[in-house]
Amino acid sequence: EVQLVESGGALVQPGGSLRLSCAASGFTFSSYWMHWVRQAPGKGLVWVSRINSDGSSTSSADFVKGRFTISRDNAKNMLYLEMNSLRAEDTAVYYCAAGDGHAKKYWGQGTLVTVSA
Amino acid sequence: QSALTQPPSASGSPGQSVTISCTGTSSDVGGYNYVSWYQQHPGKAPKLMIYEVNKRPSGVPDRFSGSKSGNTASLTVSGLQAEDESDYYCSSYAGRSWVFGGGTRLTVL
């Protein structure tokens, strides 16, 4: 059974940092591009960042460039999102998703990040 | 990286068909055949329903179909069933980035 399990979400103050993790199982993690997608409360899905299968290439949405870093450890079947300089508008549920071509085939259940003083 | 445009709501009676549109630009929807559609029930993770404009993943009913013309993609749900009531999001590759639509809430009357 395919599983993506996110963790690391928390309440953090503006300007703070957080590291999200995503544990993958049930599929060949090292063969898939991976993505982070977020959803603010009551709002729509927004693509955040992606990393290719071997971790050699990444891309991110303009609104997180210079603040968020995506990485992976294929030996541990883990995906990460390092988030710095957090703002109130970063408050959202963060999903990790496995990409099949350009579609997000598998999704985790999400982890909530709340940025508030 | 502007969001794709979807109608906020759509509705239909059981057994009817409904089509949800998704309008982008030549830099995303119109430029690539990499449009996908996701279903999201409240409090749940999104689920892939259509990829590469009109392909269905294994397990997705053939009542769901996708198409594209120019900068506008469409999702059609035929033979509406109660369980189809959900939020639907389109997404497109946009050249090193991906963009989602704002979402459409489908109501089965």
Image: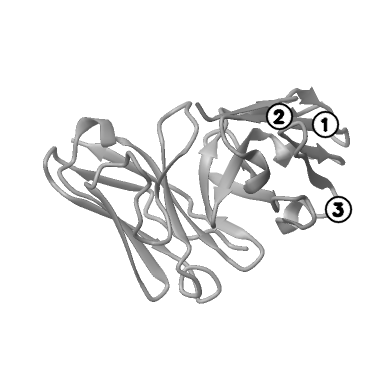
Of the residues shown, which amino acid type is indicated by label 3? Gly
**Labels 1 and 2 within one chain:** yes
* Residue that appears at 19% across and 35% down: B81
Q: Quadrant of residue A45?
A: top right
Q: How many numbered marks are there?
A: 3
Gap in angstroms between the C-alphas marked 3 and 2: 19 Å
- Name the chain under label 1: A
Gap in angstroms between the C-alphas marked 3 and 1: 14 Å
What secondary structure is found at the residue carrying circle 2?
strand
Q: Residues within 10 Å of mark 3 (few under 14, many from 20)?
A: few
Query: Is A66 positioned to the left or the right of B82 in the image?
Result: right
State the residue in front, B69 or B57: B57
* Residue that appears at 34% across and 59% down: B54
| Residue B45 placement (x, y as % from top left) | 50, 32
- Badge 1 vs badge 2, beta-carbon distance below 8 Å: yes
Which badge, 1 or 2, is on the more N-terminal residue? Answer: 1
Q: Which mark is residue A18?
A: 1
Query: Is B21 positioned to the left or the right of A13 in the image?
Result: left
State the residue in front, A21 or B14: A21
Q: Which mark is residue A66?
A: 3
Q: Which mark is residue A82?
A: none
| Residue A48 placement (x, y as % from top left) | 67, 48
Name the colouring of the figure: one colour
Residue matched to label 2: A113
State the residue in front, B60 or B43: B60
| Residue A31 placement (x, y as % from top left) | 64, 47
Which badge, 3 or 2, is on the more N-terminal residue? Answer: 3
Of the residues shown, which amino acid type is indicated by label 2? Val
- Name the chain under label 3: A
- Name the chain under label 2: A
* Residue that appears at 22% across and 36% down: B108
